[in-house]
Image: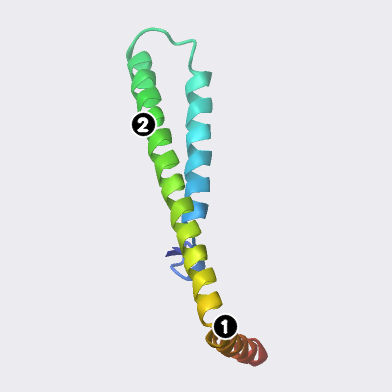
Amino acid sequence: MTIKKTAHGHNEEPISSEHLIGDFKALMADAEALIRATAHQEEGPLASIRSKALNTLANAKETIATAEGSLTEKAKIAAESADDFVHRNPWEAVGVAAGLGLLIGLFIGRR
């Protein structure tokens, strides 16, 4: 997980993989819209640039689909592991949850 920085260099909020994928998909959609807007240019340097851009976008879509599938699979495995841990160690899970709740309560109380 990375931290998003503002223009002034201050940490703003953590950036999740899902957020990055969403931003990347939006960027691809904008690029496709730009390519469609230049579709009337059939000849010259713009046509070759459009062709390259379309190939790059197709490759990027394939890569992002693979990454998204991988992230989904990892999330499922993590959820199954957590579920398995809670079923094998219910009292430890309750203790961890209580400890985290206490810490969160202390941090909220300090604000």
Q: Nearer the viewer, residue 98 or 25?
A: 98
Mark 1: few/some/many CA within 10 Å (<14, 14-19, 20+)? few
Q: Quadrant of the N terminus?
A: bottom left
Residue 109 locus on image (x, y percent): 67, 91
What separation in Å lies between label 1 and label 2 (alpha carbons)? 46 Å
Q: Nearer the viewer, residue 67 or 96?
A: 96
Identify residue type, mark 2: Asn
Q: Nearer the viewer, residue 87 or 77?
A: 87
Q: Is residue 92 left or right of residue 63?
A: right
Residue found at x 59% / y 84%: 97
Identify residue type, mark 1: Pro
Residue topped by disc 2 = 59
Of circles 1 and 2, the one toward us is 1
Q: Secondary structure at mark 1?
A: helix
Residue 82 locus on image (x, y percent): 51, 71
Residue topped by disc 1 = 90
Q: Residue furthest toward the top?
A: 43
Visible in this render: residue 5?
A: no
